[in-house]
Image (cartoon, rainbow, N blue to C red):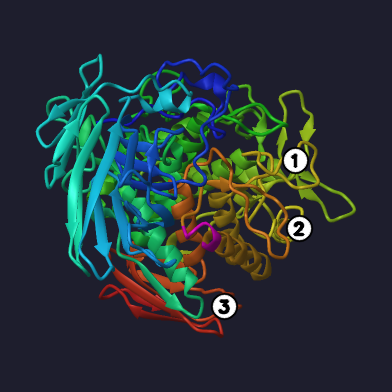
Amino acid sequence: MVLSPVPVPGHPTEHATGHPSAAGVPPARGTRPGELPPVHDALLCVALPAFAVSPEHGQLTRRGPEGVYASGRRLLSRSVLRVAGCEPVPLQGRLATADRAVFVGALRVPGDTGPDPGVTVERSRSADGTERITFRNAAARPLRLPVEVALGTDLAELGAVASGRPGPELRASVHGTGLRWTAPDGRSAAVTADPPPADALAAAGVLRWEVDLAPGAATTLHLRIHSGRTPGAAPPGGAGRPGGHLLSDVQAEGDDRRAGVLLRACAEDLRALLQRDPAHPAGVHLAAGVPWRCGPVTTEALWAARMALPLGTRLAATTLRALGRTQVTGGPESGRIPGPLRDAGPHLPPRCTGVEATLAFPVVLAEARRWGLPPADLDELLPVAERCLGWLRRGLDADGLLPDPAPGGPRRAETQAHAHRAALLGADLLDACGRPGGADLHAAARVLRERFRSEFWLDDPGGGRPAAARTPEGSVRPQLGGWAAHLLDTGLLDGGRHARGLLDRTETEQVARLLGTPALDSGWGLRSLGAKEPGHNPFGHRAGAVRVHETAVAVAGLAAAGHEKEAASLLRGLLDAAELFGHRLPEMYAGEQRTAGARPVPHPAACRPAAVAAAGAVHALTALAGIRPDAPGRSVTVQPMASAPLGAVRFSGLVVAGEPFAVRVSRLGLGMVEEAAEGLQLGV
């Protein structure tokens, strides 16, 4: 099954002209273009292809995107519990796990004389819509409670919900021990109850029970959702989550317990976002995020797979396969991985995600090999990487730089960083595998470094800065933003060495200093556009919001370059934000300046969970240990952050060379490997 096509129109990470509507539905009357129903204050249970969007009180009222979804269709939009005609008083709503939310409420019953409620009700709702409603009687007398649940659905496509045009609620019919709804296109949904209701009112969509509760007793009602599906399709949230084996059970423990909580939550979110390729059922990859970006594999999935390499290489392998199947294999664009345009902020035209994916593919393959990718996977994927590298060589212009979009687009600094990394890691990969082309890539990287320093480095009294881009007309775009973090992300070579970067030592120090200034470090993470730059908008995806994965790239790059003060500040800000987001980081949030007593401000349309945010947190946290593997060379080096910004920490359940790996970092910043594959040479 496929969830709704992505991106949903108006999602801030996509360029509106590049994508059709998610359901071919025009925006609702009175809905402004680009506006999405807010979900920042909702609880999202995720186990793709199913997810549930619930308000904190737990009652589904068909407001906005509330409901239970499977394969891009809303199976249930209304589920309102009443006892003796009254709704429970909501006390708490929380995520118990990535795929389950719990809601607690209180009931006043006749005979209660004080402020203490005699009956509590707990609703446990899973991503696939399965719900357990448990009543507990703390009163000293037996109770008979008239209970009813009002149910309804529109069976709307997710794109129609996003555009504000879900359609009317469908009329129910009695079906077995519950209710059933059928859409005009023949799709259907049904809710069954256990124990069976005493009464079912189809016209009102209501199921009724008489619940008897002895003193101190509890009883539970079970509701299950079933969907009408095409033959051979998997059930929503069905038996056996896809790819549960792809990610290790990672743990962190130490002085700052939040690191362990966040790491565990991120691993859960990554598993929840895994989904099968409908055309290749054995293939599993990450969706970009819920609720708006659950469709086919994207560039974000490739970035997430790279940042999650400490949890194993199997996710990288399946993601690379999925991307490889989309590669153009003939004509002038041969080797390019297709991708839509993406908003690039207020100063530049849209950039191409296909360029980013094409450059990332050989990087992910090369680094996965260093972490221990099996030879069979490498042999299968190497031809795809070679075609990507061939496209890179052909795409370089006369000056040795890569336009984006190519050809004819501006020369973006971030794209040059991606191209340079791909050339060096790609050359290393080809040389190691005995394939031709490495020398040409080394030469291209050398020219790119020379041209970058002459074309992109801007001298000023403050020590200089990199330009964001040069336009085809030759003008410079000097605006500084979080994109500069990519200049520090060079990638891993043999022996755990970092590849050479575009910048020299002095320029690297200056970029590190700039990333640590209040103009870019908001206190909650790295701004995508500096606060002093024209066009800055703290909610702008590329204009000032904090993008989690970009902050993580900065943390890891700064730490690897030895600029731990700036890395530690960004890492602490990210960890503080994660705690206030319940340890489920959205893909982005407002880049407002942090002040005493403040909280990070959510972006109303951001996906949460999001693959790059969850994997980015893994990337940032494991940067504390500085793990640099070389599985083909049977070695691993650990170079932790000497400042130990979170105190002592121990990571276990990591994977290097296909085997469990555990490392401890002391309060003095000293690393000790405690578990590793047999025969792996260790260096600290």
Q: Which residues are magenta?
A: 579-583
Q: Mark 3 or mark 2, which has the lower sequence index?
A: 2
How many neighbours does mark 2 have within 10 angstroms: few (below 14), some (14-19), or many (20 or more)? some
Residue under numbered circle 3: 644
| Residue 334 shows up from this direction | no
How many neighbours does mark 1 have within 10 angstroms: few (below 14), some (14-19), or many (20 or more)? many
Q: Amino acid at mark 2?
A: Pro
Q: Marks 3 and 2: which is nearer the front?
A: 2
Viewer-proximal residue, 50 or 501? 50
| Residue 652 shows up from this direction | yes
Name the residue at 77% across, 27% down: 474
Viewer-proximal residue, 369 or 13? 13
- Quadrant of residue 215 within the rendered picture: bottom left
Residue at the limit of the structure toward the left, as seen here? 176
Residue under numbered circle 2: 518
Name the residue at 63% across, 33% down: 344
Local secondary structure at mark 2? loop
Position in image of residue 87 (x %, y %):
37, 47
Name the residue at 61% across, 29% down: 403
- Quadrant of residue 23 within the rendered picture: top left
Q: In the shown orientation, is residue 98 left or right of residue 438?
A: left
Position in image of residue 550 (x %, y %):
57, 50
Q: Amino acid at mark 1?
A: His
Residue under numbered circle 1: 536
Q: Amino acid at mark 3?
A: Ala
